[in-house]
Amino acid sequence: MLQTIVKNLVFSILLITFFGSLLNVAAQDSDKKQTEQMQVQIRQLEKQLQEMREEMAKLKESLPEKKDVASTDKNTAKTEVSSFGMASVSENKSTESQSKTQEKKQIGIDLGNNIKLIPYGTIYFNAFSNSGGTNNSDVPLWATQSGQSNVGGSLRQTRFGARLEGAKIGNANLSAVIEADFFGGFPAIGIGENFGVVRLRLANAKINWEKTSVTIGQDWMVFAPNNPTSIAAAAIPQMAAAGNPWSRLPQIRIERKFYKNRIIWQGAILSPQTGDFPTGTNSPALLQPGSGAASRLPFFQSRLAFSNANWFGTKKNGSIGISGHYGRSRVTTGTSSINNDIDSVGFALDWNFPLAKRLGISGEAFFGRNLAGFQAGIFQNYNPDFAPRQGATLVSGGVRGIGTRGGWTQIWFTPDVLKDRLTFYGSIGLDDPRNEDLVSISVGDWRSRNLAYAFNFIFKPIPQFSLGTEFRRFETTFTRSGRHTANHLNLAAAYSF
């Protein structure tokens, strides 16, 4: 249609020019009547030309709108394929984050057939100090009975990955992701603290329909999916072993959305992980079954959540969910190799929503038993020689799973300064195993309570670069040696691409 209008416009201009020339001749050689007739014809042609110009302008205005709609539809389809639940879990991303995701998706390696490989990553620099002994210097989880104050620096929380997007299976979108960091340990050499070993974080493929998706591979577990925001604790989430159960496990997960995508159900079968350090006898690279794998029963998890894109009228996303977990451990004891089956069970409530335009809250509360695979129970799964009391006497009770309860919550505030680039966070977490489950024939110094709280801020001068400081305090109680404390200070910077 546009080509036809242009042709008519050019023809009209030529026609006007031709008649204009005739008018000049007629003015010299013809009478006044012929001149007036030609002027009338010229005015008619000018009117037609103006109408065609107006029609052409309207057509030009309509063309960009159609192009934007097509582009939006394509990008929306890609956005729906993104992985569920990394870091702080939220079922619906904000419009701003979707727009940024769409812009990033234009960057990548074109593999043909509309398939793109998109590399990404974050470089973390952390300078830290500890006032006393902790189980881990750069990302500590609890205070220890012994140890000394220290300072150091690390980049082993740095992560890198790649996403594959654009593939189709029928009317479903297919995506994949692989992600790793350098938090897999250290080589056994004298200067190995700066040679972080690569560790697999994520490796999964996802098939996504309009309301249903299936994920196959290693991803964040369904049970208790939220994590606090922290620039100092990226490789291990903040409040781990202090009220924040977490893990990334091989799994097959189904997700279904209902009621305008506001209600989300997830169910997963996962590889069992019970925190027993299942390595081979000759090499740490040789896998041997832990107590979870020895039970020959996978983990089962499910979650039901409600989300809203305009929580409390703030025009911000919010969600609240409940989740459950079930598995089993098989522990072999005695010279007769007696098998003891111990249930691994947990229930959790999670929340993540704004309280006001610049104020929000997130967190979890849970209880369960034998949850060391998620670093709950302060990373303690079962008591191998449990001894209940009968009066003043301890009686051997065999193997017993350690029950625990706890949770964490974090409040964030973004002041109306610096163009909303500065955010403050305050967090508190508690993991409190049942003292009755920690009594044993062979007296041990069990961790019976771990309280942690943190204060941090993150400043983003540009979206890709973050600066922050975090203070964290641990108050860990042991059954024999009592209460121990440690303070952790972390100065951090992160660059994402």
Image (cartoon, rainbow, N blue to C red):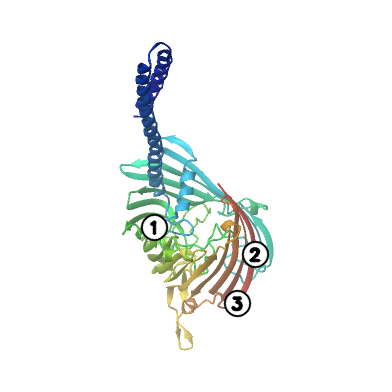
- Residue occupied by mark 3: 483
Task: Let me know if residue 493 appears in the view.
Answer: yes
- Residue occupied by mark 1: 270
Q: Are marks 2 and 3 in contact (CB under 8 Å)?
A: no
The residue lying at 38 percent from left, 12 percent from top is 30
> Front-most of 210 and 460?
460
Residue 227 % position (x, y): 49, 62
Q: Amino acid at mark 3?
A: Arg
Tag 1's secondary structure?
A: strand
Give the label on residue 37, or none.
none
> Front-most of 289 and 298?
298
Q: Is residue 450 left or right of residue 370?
A: right
- Could you classify mark 1 by the number of other residues whose Cα lies within 10 Å: few (under 14), some (14-19), or many (20 or more)? many
Tell me which label, 2 or 1, sits earlier in the chain: 1
Q: Amino acid at mark 2?
A: Leu
Tag 2's secondary structure?
A: strand
Q: Is residue 128 left or right of residue 271?
A: right
Q: Quadrant of residue 313?
A: bottom left
> Front-most of 185 and 464?
464
Residue 141 % position (x, y): 57, 66
> Front-most of 450 and 425?
425
Q: Amino acid at mark 1?
A: Leu
- Residue occupied by mark 2: 489
Residue 350 % position (x, y): 43, 66
Q: CA distance from mark 2 to mark 3?
A: 20 Å
Q: Are marks 3 and 1 in contact (CB under 8 Å)?
A: no
Q: From the viewer's perspective, is residue 164 above or below residue 273?
A: above
Which callout, 2 or 3, points to the residue nearer the camera? 2
